[in-house]
Image (cartoon, helix red, strand yellow):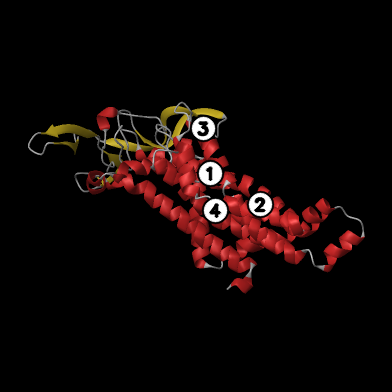
Amino acid sequence: MEIIKKIFKDKFAKAAFIVLAFIYFVILFADFIAPYSSTYSDREMSYCPPSKVYTIDTEGHFSRPYTYNYTRTYVPELMQTVYRQDRSQKHYLKLFAKGEGYKFLGIIPTHRHLIGTDEGGKLYLLGTDINGRDVFSRLLFGGRISMTIGFLSLFIVFPIGLLYGGISGYFGGIIDTLMMRFAEAIMAIPSFYLLIILAAILPSGMTSAQRFCLIIVILALIGWAGFARVIRGMVLSIKKEEYVQAAKTMGASNLRIILRHILPQTTSYVIIAMTLSVPSYILAESGLSFLGLGIQQPDPSWGNMLKEAQEFTNILYRPWLLTPGLLIFTAVLAFNLLGDAIRDFLDPKSE
């Protein structure tokens, strides 16, 4: 709680914390907030622009928010498809609108969504992609993968790194030498290229859930070595403290000394490292998915959604497809700001 109070005293850290809290809130309730499911598709609305929401009617009076559906026509003179608003019928926005069925929090069956339109209306807050899928809805569902993969990887990286580095630093000598040479060999592996190679040789029949789990394991298995090396250095210093020597004298086992007396002293560094490590895992997953080697369509992640924006014509004429990149940038920046603030609070000497 003390860290939270200090974070809110720093305006940048406070802003980063609020942004991340908001992102995790909306992805947690994505099924309810999103107007459509992640697999919803209307091929007739391919690359449909964002719906325009109006609050003033044609007579200049304030009105309930409403929108118009788009109609798609091909213009031979321009040699392209053009979307025009069908102003013959207004479609009013509704809160808790009835839509596709889902299970709220995976438990309660319901058809209610936070926002929608009346019958016959189509609401695309951030337009659609090439398959006519709602970009806004897919951003929320894709965030579940992109924003959780880092934390799930940490559950593997940090226990391994803590224990490995703790044992190496505590025993020293030939054990330390052998363990550190192995860790350095792992660190020497070019991680991103390894990820590309491993992802490329995966069976094509794997589901996105299986790929997701495998990506987590791969990221974790190549990320623990650097962390273990730092922990080892800290343990070399901590093991000389008087309370550690006293524990040895009292007959405590080596494992108990490492787990109960030495590793807890590294807590501040561990918290800092965890906060600063998450962005790298987000970028790694996004990069793999962008290259087509991570989460596969039709399942969304911010990385594979951004892949569609790599075409120049899409950047020029369909800028809403760049939204996943903006969210990746925002999330990574927020994590870095928050991590720097936590480091300053827990380790004032680093300033």
What residue is pinned by disc 3?
209
Residue sitting nearer the eye, 330 or 309: 309
Spatial separation of the CA atoms under disc 1 and disc 2: 18 Å
Residue sitting nearer the eye, 269 or 42: 269
What residue is pinned by disc 2?
161
CB of mark 1 within 8 Å of CB of mark 2? no
- Residue 32 position, x and y percent, is 47, 36
What residue is pinned by disc 1?
149
Mark 4, secondary structure of its residue: loop
**Residue 33 visible somewhere in the drawing:** no
- Residue 202 position, x and y percent, is 48, 32
Foreground disc of the pair 1, 2: 2
CB of mark 1 within 8 Å of CB of mark 4? no
Spatial separation of the CA atoms under disc 2 and disc 3: 26 Å
Q: Amino acid at mark 2?
A: Gly
Spatial separation of the CA atoms under disc 1 and disc 4: 23 Å
What residue is pinned by disc 4?
188
**Considering only order in the chain, which callout, 3 or 2, is on the residue closer to the N terminus?**
2
Q: Residue at x 39, y 38 (%)?
A: 292
Residue 91 is marked as none
Task: Give the answer, above or below, for where 226 lies relative to 148.
Answer: below
Spatial separation of the CA atoms under disc 2 and disc 4: 16 Å
Q: On the picture, is 28 further left or further right than 5? A: left
Picture quadrant where residue 80 is located: top left
